[in-house]
Image (cartoon, rainbow, N blue to C red):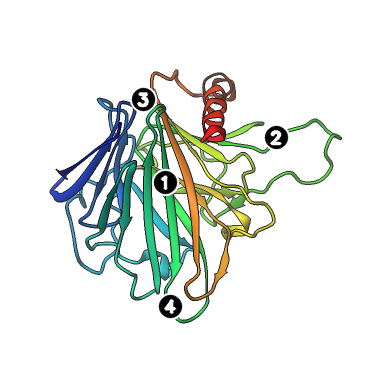
Amino acid sequence: MIQIEKTSYHNWQNCYQASNSHLSMTITADVGPRILHFGIPGRPNILYEDDNQLGLTGGDEWRAYGGHRFWIAPENDRTYFPDNHPVEVDKQPDGLLLIPPLEDSTGFQKTIQIKFFPNYPHAKIIHTLSNRSNHPSSAAPWALTVMTSGGVAILPHSPRSDWPGKLTAQNTLSLWSYTDLSDPRWMLGQRYILLRQTSDDLKPQKIGMFNTEGWVAYFVNGLLFIKFYPTTPDCGYPDLNSNLETWTNNAFLELESLGPLVQMRPDQTITHVEDWFLFSDIPEIKTETDVDQSVLPLVAQCQSVLAST
């Protein structure tokens, strides 16, 4: 059974905590929409929070705040619409619907719907993007989950095979001008890419890829966060066809999934769905073998759950 209660959180007075025996989530209605806290009851928040911005409201400057946010790709000035104003919250039997104001400068309306499931540590996050302007606009939904420090991101490669089993290219890797694959935070393996978040390197790192596996994970302090997202080949995605991206600096790490890039007609609506899972008491993840042993069995369990819902 899900419980939803009004609460305050870090000097934001209008917040909601949704929880059941498996998961706890806190959102604020003072700005956003932002999911500020996601965790197992009694365990630490797995999401990053910017201590210098918690509790702030209003103004025209875009703020990171932390937590999970909903952006519009490709990245440009439109992306940084300042979501600093109150959000309408509709309490529903299985979760919450978050409705921010119409973005007057972009013409887009966003919503985030959150659904909890009673029998598994599973939440569904439905991102809806609507073009409310009078002209077509090219856009893709972009869901960014900002993870707390000290962990490691796990990005699976598409299935591997020995030469000459498959002679055509299998997947892509998009690099930014500041990407440095010699940085020791990267581990470029045969089956996975690992990116470690550390506090001792100020230089950001980022990659993107078209990922056919449809999942990405983050391990930190015995907790394992896995999120699933749609994979639709041949649709065309932002950033050289990337449906999955990760970015890190010395404070946090982002797991980012993207939907296809669409020329949206006036009043057209598109959705982008993520499924979140969170597990505890996971052994340290340092190598590809660790991923095979500790992560893949849970990925398979999650896939079974998704297939049955």
The amino acid type found where label 2 is placed reads Pro
Q: Tell me whether circle 1 and circle 3 mark residues in contact (CB < 8 Å).
A: no
Left/right placement of residue 251 relative to residue 300 reads: left
Q: Nearer the viewer, mark 3 or mark 4?
A: 4
Give coordinates of residue 300: x percent, y percent: 57, 27
Real-space Cα separation, disc 1 to disc 4, in angstroms? 25 Å
The amino acid type found where label 3 is placed reads Asn
Q: Point out which mark residue 133 bears.
A: 4
Q: Relative to residue 85, is residue 280 depicted above or below?
A: above
Give coordinates of residue 203: x percent, y percent: 42, 48
Give coordinates of residue 292: x percent, y percent: 59, 22
Q: In front: 141, or 244?
A: 141
Left/right placement of residue 2 relative to residue 132 reads: left
Mark 4 crowd level (few <14, some 14–19, many ≥20, 10 Å Cα): some
Residue of label 3: 221
Residue of label 2: 159
Give coordinates of residue 40: x percent, y percent: 32, 28
Q: Point out which mark residue 266 bears.
A: none
Real-space Cα separation, disc 2 to disc 4, in angstroms? 42 Å
**Which tag, 1 or 3, sits closer to the chain's start?**
1
Real-space Cα separation, disc 3 to disc 4, in angstroms? 45 Å
